[in-house]
Image (cartoon, rainbow, N blue to C red):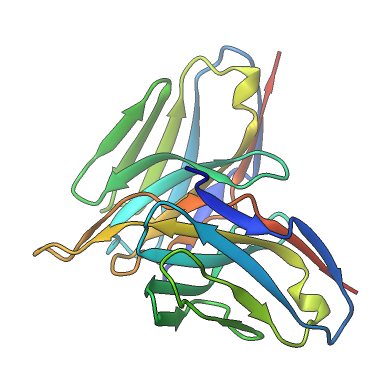
Amino acid sequence: KQEVTQIPAALSVPEGENLVLNCSFTDSAIYNLQWFRQDPGKGLTSLLLIQSSQREQTSGRLNASLDKSSGRSTLYIAASQPGDSATYLCAAGPGGAQKLVFGQGTRLTINP
Amino acid sequence: NAGVTQTPKFRILKIGQSMTLQCTQDMNHNYMYWYRQDPGMGLKLIYYSVGAGITDKGEVPNGYNVSRSTTEDFPLRLELAAPSQTSVYFCASSYFIRSESGGASETQYFGPGTRLLVL
């Protein structure tokens, strides 16, 4: 059974810092890995999707990497801004019907 | 496009009551999903559908039922509400393309959620 873990559960950093969020998964037979952002009281917004054949994806200040052999993915946020404050969730997709398995999320706070 | 819409936004139920959570998508996605999110936790899959008329159980299906009569709609039914079903419910959809290698899917799009309180 796939299990996805995100550490730390919460992170607080000053504005302007570069930071890394971590995601680990137990079953390397994933089809893709997705990173989402969730604002308080809101739904999820997709940030990046990495297919199993890819090593990383970039969108603006965000870069997500995938290492299937070690069961890890990281989300790198460059030059953090207060607007980046949110909960970030990673989810492993086992293929087929894309039944995503989610981590519990990292609550990120960027302090002005 | 409105994307994925959910109604209601918030509901309070008494133990034993029934209700249907509505979900509609206008992106012509073939795959749809229902998740629940408990406080401080990630999302867990309740049911999913790969197309009209086809549904299957996810990780936590007990106490719920679904149907998919059209591509657009995927309602979630709670028959006998219990306090353990207090949660936030999210509907999602995606487009899955089956290829020779097994398939390629686009990202899942989520609705804004329905907050349910069972007392």
Which quadrant would the N terminus of chain A be assigned to in this image?
bottom left
- The residue depicted at 37 percent of the width and 58 percent of the height is B29
Counting labels gives 0
Residue A5 visible in the current orientation: yes
Q: From the viewer's perspective, is B26 left or right of B23?
A: left
The quadrant of the image that shows the C terminus of chain A is top right
A104 lies above or below A19: below
Of residues B71 and B118, the one nearer the viewer is B71
| Quarter of image, res B43 | bottom right
**Looking at this view, is B76 or A19 the one in front?**
B76
Give the residue at the far left of this rendering: B100
Identify the image quadrant of residue B93.
bottom left
Q: Residue A91: x and y, percent?
A: 45, 54
Tell me if A41 is positioned left or right of B53 in this view. Answer: right
Q: Residue at x 82, y 64 (%)?
A: B11
Residue A28 to residue B58: above or below: above
Give residue A30's position: percent from left, percent from top: 30, 60
Say if residue B41 shows up in the picture. no
Residue B46's place in the image compared with A87, above or below, is below
Residue in the image at 80% along x and 82% along y: B82
* Quadrant of residue B8 within the rendered picture: bottom right
Residue B98 point in image, percent of width and height: 19, 64
What residue is at 46 percent from the left and 47 percent from the top? A23
The image shows residue B105 at horizontal and vertical percentages of 28, 55
